[in-house]
Each structure stands twice: as structure tokens, then as C-alpha cells.
Amino acid sequence: MNQFIYGLILFIVLALPPVSNLLESIMIVHMHMQMPLLVVAGFFMGHYFQLRFPEFFQRWNENGIPGILLFTIIMIYWMIPRTMDEALTMQSVQLFKFISLPFFAGVPLRDSWPKLSLRGKNILITGFTLMFIGMGLLYVLSPEQLCNNYLLVEQITLGWGFITMAICMVIYLAYKTFINEADYE
Amino acid sequence: METTLKQSWRDNAYRALGISPEDAKLSKTYLLVSFTTLLIGGLLGLLQGLNRAGLLELPTWLNYYQVLTAHGILLILVFTSFFTIGYFYAVHSHTLGGLLPKVRKLAWIGFNLKIVGLVLAVIPILMNEASVMFTFYPPLAAHPVFYFGLVFFVIGIWMCAFGSFIQVANWRKENKGQHVPILSYFATGVFVLLFFSSIFVAIEVFMIIPWALGWVETINVMLARTLFWAFGHTLVNIWYLSAVSAWYVVVPKVIGGRRFSDTLTRVVIILLVVLNIPGGFHHQIIDPGIHESVKFLHVFMSLAIGFPSLMTAYAMFAVFEKTARKKGGRGIFRWFSKLPWGDVRFLAPMVAMIAFIPGGAGGIAQSTNQLNQVAHNTLWVVGHFHLTLGTSVALTFFGISYWLVPYLSKRVLTPAINKLGIYQTIFWSAGMVFMAGAMHWVGLLGSPRRTSYTTYFDNATALSWDPYLMFLAVGGTLLTIGILIQVYAVIHLMFFAPKGETEFPIADVEDIATPTPYWTERWGMIIVIMLLVIGMGYVIPVVDMIINAPPGSPPFRPW
């Protein structure tokens, strides 16, 4: 229950208009801080839903794959430049952002992650790494302004943010591949 | 849970027989270089102090800025890094069952590279071709050889970092599922920070070299400064983490107590490693070209680093009180009298810790935007780092030397040298109270840093600084006496003290301590999180500095 309360508090804080305006005023903070924090809020709240509706998760997310697919679809959707623009200009899309990221991405991630095999987890991280490299190149190299609400320099910053995170994930995957934990633990 | 660890026979053999001659030679050599540079750098500091007080006019062939650059490079880069490496290699040798031959070789290669780098950097300083201060950032341009020296120095540090990683990885392979002994865990944190932060300064130096050689006309000053402080700030915390290792592990043993909590200690190390590098921005609070919002974000980052320090303060005083009360200490403060104030191995680090209370508070004050505007380019800042580095770190290093040097040389700390160490600590403390105190105060009155003595044509405000600057000189003189005593003590303990066995003091955890969770050993994950935090801190400002860069600056040599 504690985790649910922490998640809910985080969710409410993120939804406060001054906080949401501040975070959305910088493109990279919008995508790489506000959105992941919404997922984190859902991740924490998810524990309560797991306890409250165990049968639902057991029936619909038995092996974790449906949940992780839903998570991936939601994440990909919010990486598209146009969706960010729409969230800033249309209240209904903003509402969808605040519902989809915690409850359709955070909650299924919570339920699916422990159910995935190590291989499944690594495939997911590899997929996201490739996606981040692709998105990073798109945002860095595009000569056009992709969002009406953000300047070109913010777009390039976001691109480098993607590439930096991709580098971190590559290091993580290399660590998992080349270092055999059984040698040490 | 170090106490419950099953040690391999090799570890036990090393603990019983003491350090091997090869390992001892390595650490002794590092420490000897460290204290030699302390002597030279300290004497140069005296010249500066006397000059700033208007008591000594430096000759034209050795001007104030040359002395300032040499003082900074010798004490901030050389004294500290050689001590840290010598200390932690002795730690590895003691707690991990002796250094592997290849690790020892790497440390010697690192040593030689650093010495070559040092010589290359010092020659242009002596020739007055590199009076660029220890921060060496553009647009001040030194002779290219100065930067070549820095490259060798950084590569030397990397060799030692790799050696440490290999040693720890090898131990973990041989001791599966066990926690790395706490001091070697500290060493891992220190070398992770040294390695990753020096990547930033390496990039900066490789930007500067073609510019200093005249191959490119201009340089991005903001970017260079940012890269420098990503390294510079982390370096500060590397010394701090080295000092903290002795506070957590050695001091409790010296006072006859136990360590506070193994988990808390490791979490403090992890937090310092993860949060550290982006903290560099608080050195740039008054730099133009960085958005207010970014500076605000980084004030948060800087204050976050203060959090583990507060945990440390709590832990240390809890250990002191617990130990003193076990020895019969009573009252709210009377129990302090039960602590071994006559033992330099305790007194020096204890004074160091006490100095960190005003030192840390001053640091928090400086991280605040408006207060930094007042203090930034004044002697306040110099006072601040003489309190933190010059006292908290240096005095802890001195305190360590009174048991580490005899341990390495298989000699003993005699009562006479212990007494000398007490006097040394008193001289050092008094010197710093005068010098750092005067620097803080006169800084608030507006006296600038990095400026040789001037009355600004007998301007009344500038003349009003003079009494404080006199205190600065008095403090500097006391510190020089402290340095002479300290270097004498180290030489004596290394070569002349009576032969005997000295213990490597490592405190145990409490008997009722809870087990430390194993995730603390997963350095791969910790490093990835650290890199993500660095990305969070640096992507926005660095992209801005590159994309919206001004035309750049040609090299300047105002001296």
C-alpha cells in the first residue's frame, strides 16, 4: 500500500499545472523526465492493482508478453514528435498522456518485468537501444523543426539525450554479455 | 559483513605476515613523492601568503602567478593523487591478499607516466610559459608541453585505475558471493570516479592542444570550462571519499570501537559516485552562457551531494558517542573526554572532521546562486578549499600516514613521533584558523583571489584588507611549520623509526549488524546509473554550448 501512495503522490505532483508546465517547457525534460516519471508513478501504483486484481493479471498477462507489448506500444507512441505537440495543444491528448503512461505503461511494466525471462528482458532492452539510436539520429540530423512547440536546438538536445541513453544501454548490454556474473556471485 | 567473511588462506597469510616487500616499496614510493610535493608546494604557498600580505616582493624570475600555478598543480594534483594511489594500493595489498604481479606492474607504469607528466608540466611553469593556474582553462594558454604533461599524468592515473579494477575483479572471482572488503570498496569508488571524471579533462586537453599549437585559431571557452569542472569537482570528492574511508573504517578501530553500518557506508560511497560528476556546475554559477534553469537544476544536484555527507556526520558521531559511553563516558558532552585525544591517529582525522562542519556549510552557501555572486571570485573561495581540502582531507591524510608509513616500512610509531604529530596537528589547525578564517572574511569584504599584492593605488577599500591579509601570512607561516614537522615525521617513520610490526587498523562491524544486501556489489549497474545521471546533467547545457557557440577565443597570455 505504501508503494501505491508514493506512486499516487508522484502522479499528483506531476499533474500539478506549475510542475507540468515547467517540465513541458523544455523538450528533453518533457520526453525524458516527465514521461518516464509518469511511468515510474504507474510502476509504483501497479503493486496495489496486482494485489487487488490478481486474477485479471493472471488471465491477461500470464507470461508477461501482452503487458510488455502494451508498454512498448505506449512508449513508441509517445516518442513520435507529433504526439508531444498534440499533448501541448489539445487537452484531450494531454489527458491521454497522463492516463496512458502510468496505467497502460507503468502498471503493465510492473506486472510483466518479473515474468520475463532474462533473454526476454535483454531483447526488450536491445529493441529500445536500437529505437533510441534511430530516434536520436532522427532528432539530431533532421534539418526541419519536428515540433511546432519546440525550437530546433531543443530538438537536437533531445536527440543527443536519446543517443546518450542508448550508449548507457549498450554499456549495460555489453556488461551483461561479456561479464559472467556466475564468476563473481 | 566483513567479520563473517570466509577469508582464503592467502588473505590470512598476508594479514599475518604483513605487507610483501614489493607492495610496500610501491606504496612507499608513492607516499614519498606525495610528501615531497607537499614540502615544495607548501613552501611555494608560504611565498604566496607573504606576498599577499605585502611582506615579500617576489623576484621577476619567479612571479606570483608562476608560484600560484605550481602550488596548485603540486598540491591539488600531485600530492593528493599520489597519496590516494599509494594508500589504496596498500589497502588492496592488505585486504585482498597481496597485489597481483600484473597489477603492481600497472601501478609502476602509472607511476612512471605520472612522473614524466609532472616533469613535462613543471618545466614550462618554471620557464614562466605556463602561468595558467591549476585550472588551466582557456582562454589562458600555456606552452603546449604543459598540456602534453597533463596527458601523461592522466594516462598514468588510468593505469592505476585499471590495476585496481583488475585486483578487485580477481578477488571477487576467488571469493564468490562475498562482499569486497570495505576499504577496497572505497578504493573501487575512488578509481571509478577518477577514471570517468578524467575522461572529461582528457577531452578538454585534446581540445586545447591543437589550439595551443596554433593549428586551430579559436576554442570554445565555455565548453572547456565545463569539461574542466566535470573533472575538477569530482577530483575534490575523490580526495574527500579517500579521507572518508579512513573516517568510517580506521578511526573507529583507533578509538576501540566498531564501524557504524556496513550498508550505510556502502550506500554513501554509491551515492557519492553516482551523484558527483554533474555537481561540477556549481563552480560555474556566475559563468555566462548557461541558462538559469540549468543552474537551478544543478544547485539541486550539488545539494544532493551534501546528503551523503550528512549521513557520514551522523554515523561518525554515533560511533564516537557509542564507543565513549562504553568506556564510561557520561553526560551530553562529557563523553568526548573519553576519546583518545592524545593519539595522533585519532586527533588529526577528528580535527579534519570538525573542520568539515564549517567547510561543508560554506560549500552549501557557495552553491546558492545569490551567495555565490558575492563570494565567487574572492578569497572566500580560496579559504573554503583550504578548509575542505587543506584541512579535512590533508589532515586525514596526515593522520593516516602515522600508521600507514610504519606499517609499510615495518617500523613502529614511537611516543615521541606521536607527540610530534599532536604538535603538527595543533600547528596545522591554528594555521588554518588564521589563514582560512582570514581568507573567508576578507573575501566577503571583496578581496579578489588569484591576484598578487596590490593596494589599487592606495584605494581605501583595498587598504582595509591589509590587516586580514596579515593574518593570512601568519597562518601560512604556521602551516609551513606544520608541513616541515609532517614531512620530518614521514621520513622518520619510513627510514629511521625502530623496527617492529604496526597494525593496519580496520574496525569490525557490530556483532548485531544486519547483512549488507548484495546489490551493492553490482558495480556494472552502479556505473550505468552514474552515466545516466551524467547524461541528465550534461546533455542540455553541452549541446547548447556547442550549437549556440560564440565565435570562440584565440589564446591569451597576459603574463
Image (cartoon, helix red, strand yellow):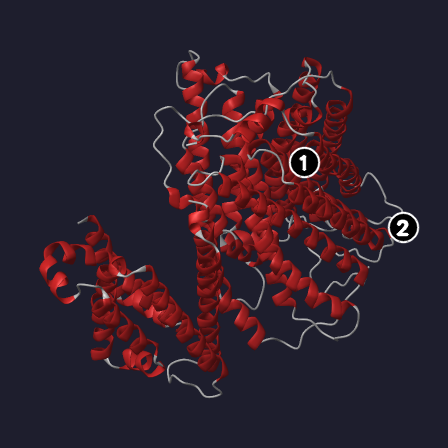
* In the depicted structure, whether residue B26 falls above or below residue A84: above
The chain identifier of the residue carrying mark 1 reads B
**Identity, as a three-letter code, of the amino acid under mark 2:** Thr
Q: Is residue B296 visible?
A: no
- Foreground pick, B118 / B111: B111
**Image quarter of the C terminus of chain A:** top left
Disc sitting over residue B124 in the figure: none
Query: Could you tell whether B120 is left or right of B352 in the image?
Result: right
**Identity, as a three-letter code, of the amino acid under mark 1:** Met
Residue A77, x across and y down, in percent: 29, 78
Q: Quadrant of residue A20?
A: bottom left
Residue B226, x across and y down, in percent: 59, 62
Query: Are callouts 2 and 1 both on one chain?
Result: yes
Q: Quadrant of residue B243?
A: top right
Q: Which residue in the protein does label 1 denote?
A: B435
Q: Which residue in the protein does label 2 denote?
A: B60
